[in-house]
Image: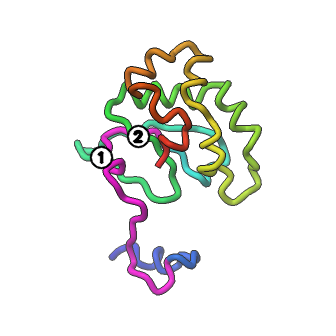
Amino acid sequence: NDHQTFFDRRKSSIYKNKPGFSIFGVGDYSFAPWKVAISGFYKKLGFVVVGPHKDKPVILDDTCYFIPCKSKNEADLLADLLNSPVSKEFFGSFIFWDAKRPITANILGNLDIFLLAKELGVEKELQKYRQNGQAKQLSLLLV
């Protein structure tokens, strides 16, 4: 392996005396063709749309939080909502930027995505993708 020396230098205890490669928390959602993702290590709030690569879903590691989506349109809508000034102001009131992992599932889970959509006038559009108001809290969408 060309990159073995880099893997051997990892300091986290979760890698000690373990196989060189691990994937945590894999489920059907992992293979969604589209995702809206953010890294827990980001020092800036910015959600990105991640689409297929060579017609295959991109698999994210356990440092990322993401919402699985079935289409690019759904992912674009969610990313627009989450990157809106209203959303950034909301999340900014909870985030401690000096932390090693400033963006956490608990912080992300505080947002009611449907309330945000209503505030921004796109509630009906969001409901097309999220039937019957399921998963109102962002934490139920994030994996």
CB within 8 Å, label 2 to label 1: yes
Identify the residue shown where x is 62% and y is 35%.
111
Q: Residue at x 67, y 48 (%)?
A: 43
Q: Is residue 28 magenta?
A: yes
* Mark 2 vs 1, N-terminal side: 2
**Residue 9 position within the rendered picture, expressed as x and y whole percent measured from the top left:** 53, 78
Q: Quickly name the residue at label 1.
A: 57
- Looking at the rendered structure, the kind of residue marked 2 is Lys
Please identify the quadrant where the N terminus is shown: bottom left
The tag on residue 114 is none
Is residue 3 depicted above or below 127 in this figure?
A: below
20 magenta-colored: yes
91 left or right of 129? right
- Structural crowding at the residue carrying mark 2, measured as other residues with C-alpha within 10 Å and reported as few (<14), some (14–19) or many (≥20): many
Magenta-tinted stretch: 15-36
Percent coordinates x, y for residue 141 in the rendering: 47, 40
Residue type, label 1: Pro
The residue beneath circle 2 is 35
